[in-house]
C-alpha cells in the first residue's frame, strides 16, 4: 500500500514543488532555532545523565525515572505557548505522572531493566 501511495502521489507533488505551485511542508514556517537546538541540547543531556544517575541506583530504573521528570518538564516548557499558572501546573503534573507510569510499567510490571 505504501509503495502504491508513494508511486502515485510523490511525482505529481514533487513536480508541483518544482513549478512553485506548492511548498515543502517543513519550509512553510520560519526555522525556530531556539526550539530545535534546545530540543537537541536537552535530549543529549538526557541521554548523558541517565546512566550517570542510574549508576547510583543500579538495576532499579531510578536513573530513567529521576532524569525523565526534569527532561519532560523542560522539553514541555520549551514548546508551550502560554506560561501561566494553569499551564505550568499541567506541565508539572505531566512531567511527574508520565515518567512515573512508564517507570512502574516497564520496571515493576514487566521487570525490564532500566538505566
Image (cartoon, rainbow, N blue to C red):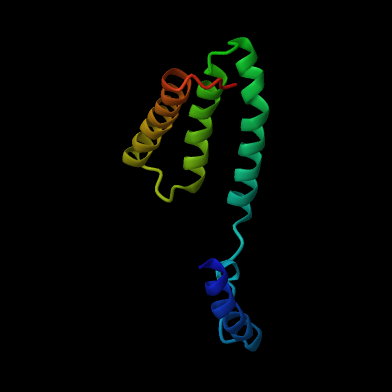
State the residue at coordinates (64%, 25%): 49
In the rendered image, which quarter is residue 57 located in? top right
The percent position of residue 100, horizontal first and vertical second, equals 42, 25
Identify which residue, 71 or 82, lies in the foreground. 71
Identify which residue, 69 or 107, lies in the foreground. 107
The percent position of residue 61, horizontal first and vertical second, equals 53, 18
The percent position of residue 96, horizontal first and vertical second, equals 41, 27
Report the label total: 0
Identify which residue, 96 or 32, lies in the foreground. 96
Q: Tell me if residue 37 comes above or below residue 59 in the rendering.
A: below
Quadrant in which the C terminus appears: top right
State the residue at coordinates (38%, 29%): 97
Q: Tell me if residue 88 comes above or below residue 96 in the rendering.
A: below
Q: Tell me if residue 47 comes above or below residue 62 in the rendering.
A: below
State the residue at coordinates (56%, 20%): 113
State the residue at coordinates (47%, 41%): 76
**Left of 31 or right of it: where is 79?**
left
Q: Tell me if residue 88 comes above or below residue 81 in the rendering.
A: above
The percent position of residue 5, horizontal first and vertical second, equals 52, 73
Amino acid at each position: 500500500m505504501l509503495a502504491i501511495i508513494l508511486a502515485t502521489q510523490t511525482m505529481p507533488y514533487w513536480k508541483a514543488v518544482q513549478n512553485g505551485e506548492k511548498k515543502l511542508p517543513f519550509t512553510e514556517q520560519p526555522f525556530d532555532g531556539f526550539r530545535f537546538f534546545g530540543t537537541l541540547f536537552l535530549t543529549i543531556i538526557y541521554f548523558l545523565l541517565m546512566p550517570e544517575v542510574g549508576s547510583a541506583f543500579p538495576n532499579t530504573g531510578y536513573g530513567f525515572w529521576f532524569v525523565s521528570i526534569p527532561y519532560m518538564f523542560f522539553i514541555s516548557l520549551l514548546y508551550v505557548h502560554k506560561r501561566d499558572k494553569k499551564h505550568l501546573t499541567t506541565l508539572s503534573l505531566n512531567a511527574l505522572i508520565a515518567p512515573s507510569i512508564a517507570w512502574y510499567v516497564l520496571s515493576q510490571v514487566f521487570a525490564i531493566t532500566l538505566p
